Amino acid sequence: MENQAAQCIVCNEPKPRGITIFGQFICDRCEQEIVNTEVSDERYRFFIERMKRIWLAALS
């Protein structure tokens, strides 16, 4: 997604670039953090909780 700001489901900030999964937007910065976070990292659980929003939106 480019040239318009969409609110990221992870950082809750409007960003011009990122990916959309089942209608839910994740900015480039958060996508890279998610991809590069180890399971043992304390941020991992936070990212899992935020990613649940994608599945909950898809089910509704």
Image: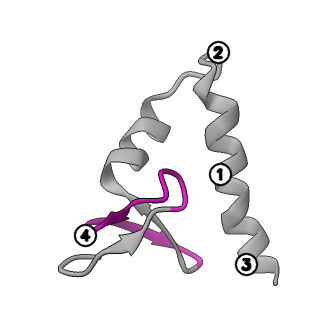
What residue would you read off at disc 1?
Answer: 50
Amino acid carrying label 4: it is: Pro
Marks 2 and 1: in contact by CB < 8 Å? no
Q: Nearer the viewer, mark 3 or mark 4?
A: 4
Q: Quadrant of the N terminus?
A: bottom left
Question: Is 25 situated above or below 28?
Answer: below
Judged left or right of residue 26, residue 14 is left
Position of residue 7 measured from the top left corner of the image (x, y, whole percent) = 44, 69
Name the residue rendered at 73%, 57% in the picture.
52
What residue would you read off at disc 4?
Answer: 16
Q: Nearer the viewer, mark 1 or mark 3?
A: 1
Amino acid carrying label 1: it is: Arg
Judged left or right of residue 3, residue 51 is right
Name the residue rendered at 70%, 63% in the picture.
53
What residue would you read off at disc 2?
Answer: 40
As measured in the structure, the alpha-carbon distance from the residue carrying label 1 to the one carrying label 3 is 14 Å
What is the span of residues highlighted in magenta in the rendered image? 9-22
Please check the rendered image and state whether residue 12 is part of the magenta-colored stretch, yes or no: yes
Q: Nearer the viewer, mark 1 or mark 2?
A: 1
Marks 4 and 3: in contact by CB < 8 Å? no
As measured in the structure, the alpha-carbon distance from the residue carrying label 4 to the one carrying label 1 is 19 Å
Q: Disc 2 or 4, which lies upstream in sequence?
A: 4
